[in-house]
């Protein structure tokens, strides 16, 4: 069984708010909370439990909520959620469904991610990258109005290969 801790927002859950029209964001312009719940299925119905610990194979749902408590809008908000080591993204679990992913935290593309592979005969073809290689998810939330709120969700599965970490601050 893995003990789950919540990743520091500075270490993974990243909020980028960019705007040429607005002054630099103050610390109070955007608040982010991260919640992690274990997904439990019994009798065909899902329920959610606190995620203090998790065993390999169990599914954790992250929900990140972005709140703008200010009296002015925040433009071009990008919500970035890391996939912690010891976990793998569960395909098609992202909400909103229009999500970008990255294997390195630098380059993002719409899911499913693809890479070029050279075959033995010299041809180059596009192949899907396994979701086990995804390390970050990103949602372009757009503008978040004064006192506005948006949430994003994704599920991850605890892998047998390493410790699970679901940190939060």
Image (cartoon, rainbow, N blue to C red):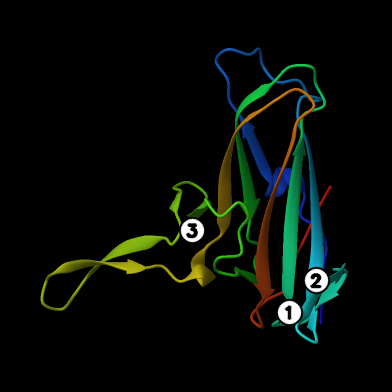
What residue is disc 2 on?
Answer: 38
Q: Is residue 71 above or below residue 15?
A: above
Q: Name the residue: 81% across, 52% down.
A: 168
| SS at circle 1 | loop
| Badge 1 density bin: few <14, some 14–19, many ≥20, Cα 10 Å | some
Q: Name the residue: 75% across, 22% down.
A: 146
Marks 2 & 1, CB-CB < 8 Å contact: yes
**Quadrant where the N terminus is found in the figure:** bottom right
Whether residue 164 is visible, yes or no, is no
| SS at circle 3 | loop
Looking at the image, the residue that sits furthest to the front is: 44
Q: Quadrant of residue 139?
A: top right
Name which of mark 2 and mark 1 comes first in the sequence: 2
Name which of mark 3 and mark 2 comes first in the sequence: 2
What residue is disc 1 on?
Answer: 58
Could you tell whether 16 is left or right of 168 in the image? left
Looking at the image, the residue that sits furthest to the left is: 121
| Badge 3 density bin: few <14, some 14–19, many ≥20, Cα 10 Å | some
Q: Name the residue: 88% across, 69% down.
A: 52
Q: What is the x, y in percent for residue 142?
A: 58, 32
Marks 3 & 2, CB-CB < 8 Å contact: no
Q: What is the x, y in percent for residue 45?
A: 78, 79
State which mark lies toward you, 1 or 3.
Answer: 1
Could you tell whether 152 is left or right of 34 in the image? left
Q: Which mark is residue 103?
A: 3
Whole-angstrom CA distance, mark 2 to mark 1, is 7 Å
| Badge 2 density bin: few <14, some 14–19, many ≥20, Cα 10 Å | many
Q: Is residue 113 above or below residue 52?
A: above
Counting every numbered tag in the picture gives 3
Name which of mark 1 and mark 3 comes first in the sequence: 1
């Amino acid at each position: 069984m893995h003990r789950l801790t919540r990743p520091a927002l500075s270490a993974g859950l990243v909020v980028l708010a960019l705007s040429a029209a607005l002054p630099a964001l103050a610390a109070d312009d955007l608040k982010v909370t991260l919640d992690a719940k274990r997904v439990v299925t019994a009798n065909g119905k899902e329920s959610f439990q606190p995620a203090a610990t998790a065993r390999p194979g169990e599914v954790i749902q992250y929900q990140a909520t972005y709140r703008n408590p200010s009296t002015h809008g925040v433009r071009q908000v990008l919500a970035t959620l890391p996939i912690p080591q010891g976990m793998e993204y569960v395909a098609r679990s992202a909400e909103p469904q229009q999500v970008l992913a990255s294997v390195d935290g630098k380059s993002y593309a719409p899911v499913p991610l693809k890479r070029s592979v050279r075959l033995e005969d010299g041809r180059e073809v596009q192949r899907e990258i396994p979701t086990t290689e995804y390390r970050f998810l990103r949602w372009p939330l757009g503008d978040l109005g004064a006192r506005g709120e948006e949430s994003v969700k994704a599920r991850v599965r605890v892998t047998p290969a390493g410790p699970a970490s679901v940190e939060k601050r």
